[in-house]
Image (cartoon, helix red, strand yellow):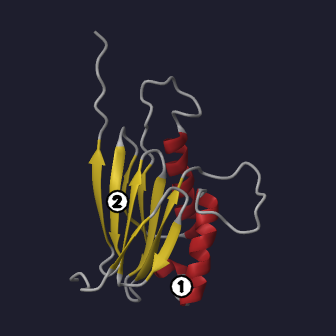
């Protein structure tokens, strides 16, 4: 599907969520964060979240936040209801969850990416969404670009170069 002549490009910052129609491209840059995309091939609507953490320790806000995987899922559900298409008709893709601190001993800060991926996969499975693509884990960051008009997601993975100790 060709790019619309007057498409809009959105850059997601960490913790943001965006859902739109076929005239939109969504981009983001990920390290240990994850980006989940949902796309409806017939309606050509979809969205992306840029989640920092798997879940909030204690929910204090009434509104869900795109910062957390489980709350971003709530935001997706709101959009799916608004567009009146069954959840099972959407396609999911998952990206990110890189280890940004490979030299740090195993622990909470070095494993946040893996926990983000694990929580995202749990929700995808729980909701029965078809996961049609993923590029997760490893070391380094990713540039992600989602073209809603076609459902294509482009990923450029930039592995970290680490110097060996002399």
Q: Nearer the viewer, residue 87 or 10?
A: 10
Q: What is the total number of numbered labels drawn onto the structure image?
A: 2
Q: Is residue 33 above or below residue 133?
A: above
Residue 104 at x, y percent in the picture: 48, 24
Residue 52 at x, y percent in the picture: 55, 51
Q: Secondary structure at mark 2?
A: strand
Q: Which numbered tag is attached to residue 86?
A: 1
Real-space Cα separation, disc 1 to disc 2, in angstroms: 26 Å
Quadrant placement of the C terminus:
top left
Task: Determine the image quadrant of residue 66.
Answer: bottom right
Q: Is residue 78 above or below residue 98?
A: below
Residue 25 at x, y percent in the picture: 35, 74
Q: Nearer the viewer, residue 162 or 112?
A: 162
Which-is-in-front pick, marks 1 and 2?
Answer: 2
Q: Is residue 2 visible?
A: yes
Quadrant placement of the N terminus:
bottom left
Residues at marks 1 and 2 touching, judged by CB atoms closer than 8 Å: no
The mark that comes first in sequence, 1 or 2, is 1
Q: Is residue 90 visible?
A: no
Q: Nearer the viewer, residue 16 or 123?
A: 16
Crowd class of label 2 (few under 14; some 14 to 19; many from 20; radius 10 Å): some
Q: Which numbered tag is attached to residue 160?
A: none
> At 47% across and 54% down in the image, what residue appears?
34
Q: Is residue 140 above or below residue 46?
A: above
> At 49% across and 43% down in the image, what residue appears?
113
Q: Secondary structure at mark 1?
A: loop
Residue assigned mark 2: 144
> At 61% across and 56% down in the image, what residue appears?
68
């Amino acid at each position: 599907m060709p790019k619309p002549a007057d498409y809009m490009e959105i850059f997601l910052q960490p913790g943001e969520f965006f859902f739109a129609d076929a005239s939109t491209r969504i981009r983001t840059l990920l390290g240990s964060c994850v980006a989940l995309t949902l796309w409806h091939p017939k309606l050509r609507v979809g969205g992306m979240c840029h989640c920092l953490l798997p879940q909030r320790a204690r929910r204090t806000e009434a509104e869900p936040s795109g910062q957390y995987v489980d709350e971003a899922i709530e935001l997706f559900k709101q959009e799916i209801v608004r567009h009146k298409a069954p959840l099972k008709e959407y396609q999911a893709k998952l990206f990110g969850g890189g280890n940004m601190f490979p030299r740090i001993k195993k622990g909470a800060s070095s494993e946040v990416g893996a926990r983000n991926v694990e929580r995202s996969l749990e929700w995808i499975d729980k909701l029965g969404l078809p996961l049609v693509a993923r590029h997760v884990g490893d070391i380094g960051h990713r540039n992600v670009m989602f073209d809603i008009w076609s459902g294509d997601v482009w990923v450029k993975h930039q592995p970290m170069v680490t110097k060996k100790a002399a």
